[in-house]
Image: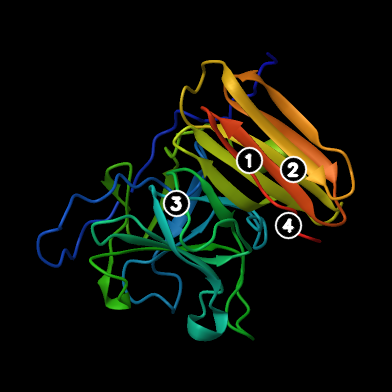
Amino acid sequence: MRPRRLFAGAAALVIGLAGAVLLGSPAQAAPAFQLPFPCGQTWNGNSSNSSAHVSWEIDFNRGSTATADLGDTVVAAAAGTVEVSAHQGSVNGYGNLVVIDHGGGYFTYYAHLDSRAVTAGQAVLRGQAIGSVGNTSKPGNGISPHLHYEVRYPDRSQSHIIKAVFNGSTFGYGSANVTSNNCATSYDPAAECGSGFQVIDSVKLGSAGTTNLLWKGSTGQNCVITLKMASVGTPTATSAFLEPQGASRTTDSGSFSYYAGPVIRTAPGCVKWGGSAGGNSYTSGFEHCA
């Protein structure tokens, strides 16, 4: 078994969940929301810098330039089922939008994404990659890359946006730096695949982990990495594979403590990809045809 590199800051502190304006008694306790970014990353959240804000929304950035965050990985703040995964720019200005239903009337919104890695109806784990930071919006609305994040309760009405809570602490409205404790896995798939890669597809493997497909447009390469989210640190059977259509399959398989892969291949056309962890496996058809 080869050693795996731990993501820096994996044990860092976090802040933030949904609190405030509770409309009656909750049907069930709020999920244990975490920051919607990989473990250890620090992001600045701002709730007052956009004219689009009507309530407790947060815009997140961390880079030193306007475009520094473009393509950075966005993860699910809590487990749930994807309610919406669509480009809604002309409808509401959210651009590429993912909405996750966490049950009990709690919904999270992830807007302006550059890529969406999940589809409507798909179950996701907390910490699973769901897309990447972008600047998609309505036609003619030029915005810099950022993640627009909302929590809504007890339904999806815009008037029911409530305060966000991360790791049990209410976000420090209007602006605060927050470090992610979304640490079911200590790895960012984009960081492990390398500079320029961003997540374009992600599938959960039961509760054992996720297998993730990434793309680097500048080189025409795909990358697959399977991240463990159970038995982390203990060697168990884990795999990742990538097969460009018309070419042989490349597989990384073994007893790994943290992840399998990354498997990187040039893929000018369609790819078949997948992986396994904890006795669960996923194999796609040929898809994501460049």
Separation of marks 3 and 4 at Cα, in angstroms: 20 Å
The residue where tag 1 is placed is 189
The residue where tag 3 is placed is 123
In this rendering, the answer to whether 91 lies above or below 14 is: below
Of marks 2 and 3, the one in the foreground: 3
Separation of marks 3 and 1 at Cα, in angstroms: 19 Å
The residue where tag 2 is placed is 223
Residue situated in front as seen by the camera: 183 or 155: 155
- Amino acid type of the residue tagged 3 in the rendering: Ala
The answer to whether the residue labelled 2 contacts the one labelled 3, judged by CB atoms less than 8 Å apart, is: no
Of marks 1 and 2, the one in the foreground: 2
The answer to whether the residue labelled 4 contacts the one labelled 1, judged by CB atoms less than 8 Å apart, is: no
Q: Residue furthest left?
A: 25
Locate residue 135, reporting x and y percent: 61, 69
Locate residue 122, reporting x and y percent: 48, 56
The residue at 28%/45% (across/down) is 169
